[in-house]
Amino acid sequence: MAEYTIVVGLEVHVQLQTASKLFCGCANRFNPEHPNTQTCPVCLGLPGSLPVMNRKAYELSVKTALALNCNIARFTKWDRKQYYYPDLPKNYQISQYDLPFSYDGWLDIAADDADAPLRRIGIIRAHLEEDAGKNIHDESGRGNDSQVDLNRTGTPLLEIVSQPDLRSASEARRYLEELRLLLTYIDVSDCNMQEGSLRCDANVNLHVHSLDGKHIPTPITEVKNMNSFRNVELAIEFEAKRQYEEYQRTQQKLGDVPKTTRGWDANRELTYPLRSKEEAADYRYLPDPDLAPVTVTDEQVAQIKTGLCEFPADRRQRFQDAYYLSPYDASVIISQGLSFADYFEAVAKIAGDGKMAANWVTQDILREIKERQLTEGTYPVPADVLGTLLSQIHANMITTKSGRDVFQILLDEQNEATVTADRVMQIIEENGLKVVNDTGQLTAAIDEVLERSGSQQAIDAFRGGKENAIGPLIGQVMKNVKGADPKQVREMIVEKLK
């Protein structure tokens, strides 16, 4: 039996894709090259300035909460979360405390065991708040000044708090991957961790298994400063081992000591102490007197709901059912994003063969995208063109080999001008690539190849039991008859040599 069970809850902070900040008209965009240029009296907290709520930010928040199966509060309010830090000019953050706009949701993820049912991870709440600025510290150890960039101050930030339902570091990573995929599909955030659009804190503790069958909870630690999903996974794995060693040494249980906060050092792959964790009383929450409460009607919620697209999990399952894809192929396509999933589906519908379309888009198309360094939503060949090409292979009008020859021609021509579906048929005709069904023509070509003096060695080897020896002979026939089906050619050569 395992010595302990890992218990993890995640707090995910997501910057919303609005044109302006949450309570003022300053631009909301990543702009590190020009620090402190996207500010105004409101987000700087200057005396006399008053906030005005960004309606779009609230609508995107409700959109996200609906996608996470949350209940939407018909009445919510704003609260001031008091704390002093250089990147918080007002010395308080406008957030939501006891009346968040959404609560009690869930997100399904794959279990560690691929054959096990989906794991349902509870969502305690999703609430809207303003982001702080960014502190830039000197990490050289030379004692230089720290710098503050307030461009980010006041950016609309959605905090999604999960239940402590995650039971492994790998589950935490899959939860984040599925959450990011959902948020990008519904177009509320770009979720770029390198730019800080998505940030994550992990609350970790253990349930230690005692000899009498009881589970003893250890003190909770919040881990910060994780800038990738891989680092979240590594930090949780390290913290679990550290906590177990700490428990063996001190026997401290949950409640014996205050909750602590630790940072993650990606270079050394370890956590280090930051501070004891503040509780709600430390922040001295109070209702913000400058902002009116927000009310929303059933009709408004229903209107926002109509703007939701098909969710990644639903589309993943539909691709398996409608196009007979394996769970792996469907996951690869869905994980590439909404545009790529749309591209695949357009190709599959025209091709008439979902499995073939999946193979081509996940191999040939993804390879070309990577080699050509194409931006998201840009493809080396239009969907209708690739679909038309694959439809010819599916109908046995051309061979797969000929299809790849046509594909290469299309790639070359696409560099000069946009190709069309009609061009596929023109290339097939111009190069004589239609499958040859004339057995008389094939028989003549095979006889001509077999009669060559250089073919005798391959013929003798085949008759001696080496079946692959006739590969070069098949290639010579295919060269002479471009539209020949290699399978048919092989069968005819084998019949003649028996």
Image (cartoon, rainbow, N blue to C red):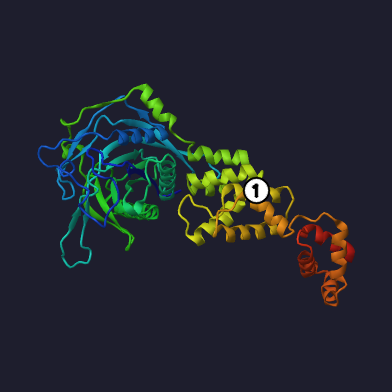
143 or 165: nearer the eye? 143
Image side of residue 108 versus residue 268, left or right: right
User: Mark 1 — residue?
Assistant: 388
Residue 69: x and y, percent? 41, 32
Res. 13 image quadrant: top left
* Quadrant containing the C terminus in the rendered view: bottom right
Say what amino acid the circle numbered 1 marks: Thr
Classify mark 1: residues with Cα within 10 Å, few (<14), some (14-19) or many (20+): many
Give the number of marks.
1
Above or below, comparing residue 303 to residue 482 in the picture: above
416 or 152: nearer the eye? 416
406 or 21: nearer the eye? 406
Above or below, comparing residue 401 to residue 304 in the picture: below
Image side of residue 446 versus residue 383, left or right: right
Residue 360: x and y, percent? 61, 53
Res. 135 image quadrant: bottom left
Residue 110: x and y, percent? 49, 43
